[in-house]
Image: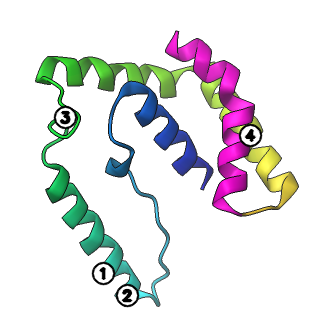
Amino acid sequence: MGMNALVHRILKEIGIREERFSLQWASAAEAPRFVKLITDFTRQMQELGPLGKAEGLSREELQKRLQKGLEIVSSQSVRVSFGNAAKAVRKDAIWTFEHIDQVINDKMAKSLEKALG
C-alpha cells in the first residue's frame, strides 16, 4: 500500500495520470477477483489510450517526464525516506489506505520536494 501511495504521488508530480498505476492483491484462491482486476484495469487503459495521449503530452515531453520520475525513484534520499515511512506504517499498525497515504506524504515530503527540485 505504501508503494501505491508513493507511485501515485510521483506520477501526479510529473504529470502522468495516476490511474495508469494500480497495485492490487489477489490470492491464488481468488481467481474471479483477479480476472475482474485485470479486466477493469485493461478497460481503463484502453479508455485512456497510449501513454501520454490522455495527458496531452508530446513524445519528447513524455520521455522527459518519465526520465524525471526515474531520477526521483533512484534518489537515495527518496529511497531512505520511503524505508522510514514504511517502518512508521508498520509501527502504527493502521492499515487503511488513508493512513498509509498520509504517512507516506508526511514522511517523504522533504525528500520528494528536493528530488523534484
Residue at left offset 50%, top offset 70%? 25
| Disc 1: which residue | 35
Q: How is the image coloured?
A: rainbow
Spatial distance from mark 3 to mark 1, Cα to Cα?
A: 26 Å
| Corner quadrant of residue 22 | bottom left
Q: Tell me how far mark 1 sits from mark 4, CA to CA.
A: 32 Å
Residue at image location 68% in from the left, 30% down from the top: 108
Q: How many marks?
A: 4
Looking at numbered disc 4 in the image, what kind of residue is underneath it?
A: Ala
Residue contact between numbered discs 1 and 2, judged by CB atoms under 8 Å: yes
Q: Is residue 104 magenta?
A: yes
Q: Label 2 amino acid?
A: Ala
Q: Amino acid at mark 3?
A: Gly
Cα distance between the residues tagged 2 and 3: 32 Å
Q: Which residue, given by chain and number where applicable, does mark 3 sit on?
A: 52
Label placed on residue 31? 2
Main secondary structure along the magenta-highlighted residues = helix
Q: Is residue 61 above or below residue 13?
A: above
Q: Secondary structure at mark 4?
A: helix
**What span is colored magenta in the figure?**
96-117
Residue 102 within the magenta-colored segment of the rendering: yes
The residue where tag 4 is placed is 85
Which is more toward the observer, 28 or 4? 4
Q: Secondary structure at mark 2?
A: helix
> Which of the two labelled residues, at mark 3 and mark 4, occupies the earlier sequence position?
3
Q: Quadrant of the N terminus?
A: bottom right
